[in-house]
Structures are given as structure tokens and as C-alpha cells.
Amino acid sequence: MKRLGLAGCSVWLLTLFSVPVMADQSRPQLERLTCAALDRAVLSLADGPVLLASYPAFEGHPPAIIALRGVAFTYDNALASIALFGCGKPQSAERIADALTYAVDNDPDYHDGRLRNAYVAGSVKTSGPILLPGYWSQERNAWNQDAYQVGSATGNQAWAVLALLEAFRQTQTPRYLQAAEKILLWTQRNTYDSQAPAGFIGGFYGYPPNPVRQGWKSTEHNIDLAAAWDALNRIKASAESATQARIARDFVDRQWLAQEGRFLIGTLPDGRTAEHQRSGLDAQIWPLIAVRQPPADWSRVFGFVDQAHRFGEGYGFSRDPDGLWTEGTAQAAAVAHLTGAADKACALWPVLIAQQSTDGWLFATPQAQISTGLAIGPDSTSNDFFYYHLPHLGATAWAAIAASGVNPFTGAQEAN
């Protein structure tokens, strides 16, 4: 077996049976199947604004994940909209952006520009408040809502902004820009914390009218906001946008540990004390493509990632992971591709294709369940944020983003 380089990827010539092998087609194959899956999911719903279920209908799984049924997570849908633009499916992308835009002004409880972490999946009725997810609890014999889903995490606000600004760049439709500005204004007013290291806190968890303020600061959330504010500033330049982008970027800069070649995950709940033990894959690699002119030294982070986050042929969420995280492996492929690490990206395309479930969707993980090492909320008694062996919108969207060569933070698309 002989390995040859071709167009940044590798070609394997199998000589045992003298069978010629074409160049690796994993990336275009991944792009076709994931783009088609996302487009079909939108087209399967009635005309108008839509939010896609983060996990399609599933049966026979533990009761603990009943709260995921019929739920459209804001982050996943923002990714899907960005991905669909990159896939060349603008009409489907706009339908999701329209739903996010409607949600900004039609919350059942708040009228301040924030988004919830999740909504009811499906066609969005554009009359009356947008619907929030929930389920009937047999144990309580009552309607139940998930405290995280009805909260407002800062990073999710930023990703919605990135999706809306991409929709504006693609269409020049004013309502997308206006909705993005409202969301960012809410984050500025409600999540900024001036105590060192200055930056933006995690957001709010729980039920209205008094959700719990989450005082920890996340590297990932601040990466997202740095990109979102910078994206707004490129479209509509202002001193305020530039200032907010700089605050978030400065926080990210301070999380870089040059001696270890990695980023800290953020702070403890006091908003001051650095968290040194845990690591999140996204916080390690997103800075390489999310901010303008990242320091060359940051490229060393893949050495840490390969040592701390590697699981099999892909990557896991946490340090010393207990399974493969498909979404994160797609993120690694995207970052590697966009930063010129072609060989690293090429090795991940077939890993992602292998996670295909049905109809082009990718499983969140091939394991039954994997841990992130993180807690869902302040009332959690353990690190209870898991991913399951279920088809997952976030994983599918990130794979489409990676395979199509889109930088989701800027909307720029590399030539295939």
C-alpha cells in the first residue's frame, strides 16, 4: 500500500489485488449527505419559519432524555442555518433565520431581546408568543419544563447573532440585522462583568421572572461574542461594537497558557478564579478561526488537543474523553481545513461519514452516552451534561459546515 499526496488530501493505491483507487472522496460525500439531510428536514415542514428538532423522533431510549423530544436548541438551529447557506440552500437557511428573528420579538415572558436556549421544534406560528419546550411528567403528573432550555446562555445568543448576520449578508434583509443588534444589546447590558478578568458571564438559568445569574465566564462564550460583535462591526461599523468585540477578545487572549500550549476553559462561578483542570475541545480550537489575526503561537493548541482530547481516530469533548464526540470531531476538521492543516482534516472526513445514522444525519456519538465533564446548571448534583447515541442536528450541521469549507464565524467559504 503506497500513500501519495493529492490536492491536500491523501490517495491510497492498493496494490495487493492491483485494484486502482480513486482520490479520497470522503469530504464531498460528507458534504452531499449532510447538506441534503438538513435541506430535507426543513422542506419536510410546512412553508414559513421553522426550527429543526435537535434530535429527530426516537423511541426506546432512557426516560432521562425525554426532555430532548421535540426540542429545537437555538445553537443547533443557528448552525443549521449557517450550514445551509454554505450548502447553497438559501431558502431553507432563511426559514430558520426567520424563526430566530420571530423569537427575538415574541417571547412569552421577556421583551428585552434575549433568546431562550431552546424552543418547540417544527413550523413556527407567526401569531402569538413563540412556544417553549416541555413535556408531561408521569412522576409529577404535571407539565414540566427544563430549566436549562428556558434559560438564556450567552454563547447561544452569540451563535444566533452569527446566523442572523450571515442571513443579512446573504440577503440584505434588514430584519435579520435588527434582530442581531437586539440580541447583542441584551448581552451587553446583562452579561458583562467588569471584575478581572473582564468579560461576559455564562448567562441565565431557570424560569422567569427571576432566572439564576451564572457568574462563571466561559472562554467559548467569549470567543463567540468576540466573533459576533466583530461581524456586526464589519457590517455596521461603530465604536461600541468594536469595544465589545475587544472586551471579549481580551478575555480569550488572557485564557491562553503559552507554557502549556492551550486555553483555559474559563473561570469558576466567582467569575475571577481560573479553572485549570477541565478542558473543552471547542474552547481550544475555535479561537483559531473565530478571531481576526490570531497569534501564530495559538496553532500549537492542536498538540494539546491531540494529547488531551483524542479518542480513537477522532476527538472527545472533555479532557481524557470517554467517547468520540462527532460534533467536536467535525469542528476539528473544519478548523484544520481552514487553517491549512490538510492532512489532519483529511483523516477526519471518513471518521465523520462513519457516524451516519439514517437519512444523512450523524450520530452525536457512536457510544451509548458520553460525558462532557460539565454540569447543565447550578442545581445539578453531578456533571450531568451528556451526549447520546442519537442522530443530532448539531453534529450534522457542523459536519456540513466543515465539508463545505465555511468559516461559521465569518461566513467566508474556502474553495473546495
Image (cartoon, helix red, strand yellow):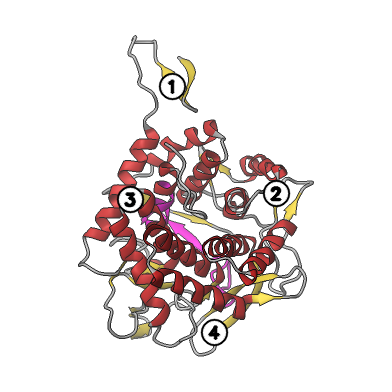
- Tag nearer the camera, 1 or 4: 1
The image quarter containing residue 374 is bottom right
On the question of residue 67 being in view, the answer is no
The image quarter containing residue 185 is bottom right
The percent position of residue 99, horizontal first and vertical second, equals 34, 71
Report the residue marked by disc 1.
Answer: 11
Alpha-carbon neighbours of circle 3 within 10 Å: few (<14), some, or many (≥20)? many
Report the residue marked by disc 3.
Answer: 361
**In the picture provided, is 328 more to the left or to the right than 23?**
right
Q: Of the residues shown, which amino acid type is indicated by label 3?
A: Trp
Q: Of the residues shown, which amino acid type is indicated by label 2?
A: Arg
Report the residue marked by disc 2.
Answer: 262
Q: Of the residues shown, which amino acid type is indicated by label 1?
A: Val
- How far apart marks 2 and 4 lie (CA) works out to 33 Å
**In the picture provided, is 3 more to the left or to the right than 66?**
right
| x 36%, y 76%: residue | 102
Labels 2 and 4: the sequence-earlier one? 4
The image quarter containing residue 175 is bottom left
Find out whether the residues at labels 1 and 2 contact each other: C-beta distance under 8 Å: no
The percent position of residue 390, horizontal first and vertical second, equals 36, 55
On the question of residue 77 being in view, the answer is yes
| x 44%, y 77%: residue | 146
- How far apart marks 1 and 3 lie (CA) works out to 26 Å
Q: Is residue 151 above or below residue 394?
A: below
Q: Closest to the observer: 103 or 52?
A: 103
